[in-house]
């Protein structure tokens, strides 16, 4: 009879290859398992944070650009009398019919966007007027010319956003009779890069010819030429109507 014997050391070595690390060394196995679990938790938390931040940003964009815009409508009747010569009781001296200007305004992010439709009677081009109170700029988009004109914001004439909103709330409750003032602006140079003008003016004037303007009274030695190409926009951002005359020599 032949006896078959196994080397105990080899047997234990062979069996040791099949034993999992956690069973072979409980302490070492628990360390590896803990590190792997912690890593998975961190990756999960990072993924959730990324998803939540994306939802927050996306929700803000949807709310900002797709929610209905709050527009306020107002109208003013006016007489073409300089404020210094205007009588105390204007209604008693005004003609039976007074021309009228209608506007819609939207105010957001310290910006007022005014829609001036074409007047039913009298002179004036339809336009969008944007007052950026943060950048201290005003842009006129003449819808007849399809051209933008940019000038520093006249803070002595244009009401601050909250005051402008209060004015339109008053106008929504009834008619308003006022006077007309004249503003004479002159085109100076073309603007090729709209980026420095900010997001709102860039969006308004993108793909349209855009020019800088200056008030005629501020141009030293400027002589009015016999022939000028001028357009008129009648609008209001205060308790009077402004007739803005934009001229290109």
Image (cartoon, helix red, strand yellow):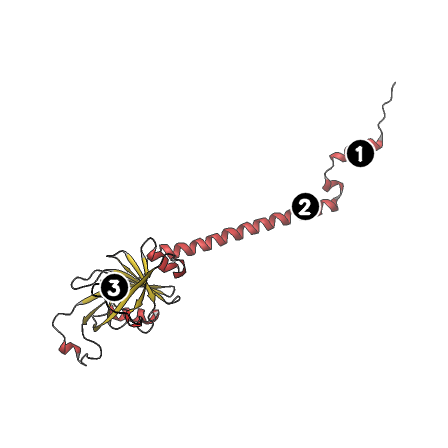
Element at badge 1? helix
Label 1–label 3 contact, CB within 8 A: no
Mark number, residue 231: none
Residue 152 is left or right of residue 176, and the answer is right
Q: CA distance from mark 2 to mark 3?
A: 78 Å
Query: Which of the 4 image quadrants contains residue 109?
Result: bottom left
Residue 168 is left or right of residue 40, and the answer is left
Q: CA distance from mark 1 to mark 3?
A: 99 Å
Q: Earlier in the sequence, mark 1 or mark 3?
A: 1
Q: Nearer the viewer, residue 123 or 3?
A: 123
Mark number, residue 13: 1
Label 2–label 1 contact, CB within 8 A: no
Residue 181 at x, y = what percent? 23, 72
Q: Nearer the viewer, residue 146 or 63?
A: 146
Circle 3 residues within 10 Å: few <14, some 14–19, many ≥20: some
Q: CA distance from mark 2 to mark 1?
A: 25 Å
- What's the residue at 74%, 47% (across, down)? 27
Tell me: residue 102, above or below residue 48.
Answer: below
- Residue that badge 2 annotates: 33
- Residue that badge 3 annotates: 247
Tell me: residue 62, above or below residue 232.
Answer: above
- What's the residue at 52%, 51% (across, down)? 50
Residue 77 at x, y = what percent? 19, 70
Element at badge 2? helix
- What's the residue at 50%, 51% (across, down)? 51
Outermost bottom residue = 88
Quadrant position of the N terminus in the picture: top right
**Mark closer to the observer (2, 3):** 3
Circle 1 residues within 10 Å: few <14, some 14–19, many ≥20: few
Circle 2 residues within 10 Å: few <14, some 14–19, many ≥20: few
Q: Earlier in the sequence, mark 2 or mark 1?
A: 1
């Amino acid at each position: 009879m032949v006896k078959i014997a196994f080397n105990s050391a080899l047997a234990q070595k062979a069996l040791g290859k099949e034993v999992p690390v956690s069973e072979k060394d409980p302490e070492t196995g628990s360390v590896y398992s803990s590190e792997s679990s912690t890593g998975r938790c961190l990756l999960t938390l990072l993924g959730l944070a990324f998803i939540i931040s994306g939802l927050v940003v996306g929700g803000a964009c949807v709310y900002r650009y797709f929610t209905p815009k709050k527009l306020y409508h107002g109208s003013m009747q006016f007489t073409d009398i300089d404020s210094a010569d205007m009588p105390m009781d204007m209604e008693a001296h005004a003609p039976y019919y007074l021309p009228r200007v209608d506007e819609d305004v939207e105010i957001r992010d310290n910006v007022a966007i005014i829609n001036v439709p074409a007047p039913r009677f009298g002179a004036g081009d339809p336009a969008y007027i944007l007052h950026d109170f943060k950048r201290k700029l005003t842009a006129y988009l003449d819808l007849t010319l399809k051209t933008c004109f940019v000038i520093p914001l006249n803070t002595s004439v244009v009401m601050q956003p909250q005051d402008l909103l209060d004015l339109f709330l008053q106008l929504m409750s009834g008619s308003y009779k006022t006077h007309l003032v004249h503003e004479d602006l002159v085109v100076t140079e073309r603007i090729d890069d709209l980026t420095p003008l900010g997001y709102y003016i860039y969006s308004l004037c993108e793909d349209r010819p855009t020019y800088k303007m200056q008030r005629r009274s501020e141009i030293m030695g400027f002589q009015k030429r016999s022939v000028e190409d001028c357009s008129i926009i009648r609008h209001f951002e205060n308790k009077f109507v402004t007739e803005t005359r934009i001229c290109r020599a």
